[in-house]
Amino acid sequence: MRINRFKLTMELMRQDMTQKQLAEKAGVSRVTVNGIKSGRSCSDEVGKKIARALGVDVTEIID
């Protein structure tokens, strides 16, 4: 799954959330979140965890 970096960044800003906070809330490592923000793809499971942590549907943050 490829999460859209721009959409992720905008959602983090909208929620005033750091990458570290997102990682903790999603139950993934900060390195994973950083990689996704850098354009790396992730598993469907990780994508769903991130969307859930942000309180959005996964379709709102993917390409």
Image (cartoon, grey):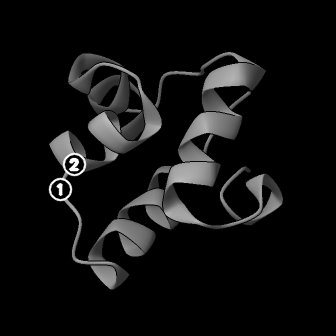
- Kindly state the secondary structure of the residue where label 2 is placed: helix
- Kindly state the secondary structure of the residue where label 1 is placed: loop
Q: Is residue 42 above or below residue 12?
A: above
Quick check: can you spot residue 39? yes
Residue designated by label 1: 18
Seen as rendered, the residue at the extreme bottom is 14
**Taking 58 as reference, is 30 left or right?**
left
Q: CA distance from mark 1 to mark 2?
A: 5 Å
**Number of marks in picture:** 2
**Taking 26 as reference, is 42 left or right?**
right
Q: Quadrant of residue 57?
A: bottom right
Task: State which quarter of the image contains the N terminus.
Answer: top right
Residue designated by label 2: 21
Q: Quadrant of residue 2?
A: top right
**Taking 3 as reference, is 60 left or right?**
right
> Which one is nearer the viewer's eye here, 2 or 32?
32
Q: What percent of the width, then of the height, locates residue 50?
A: 54, 42
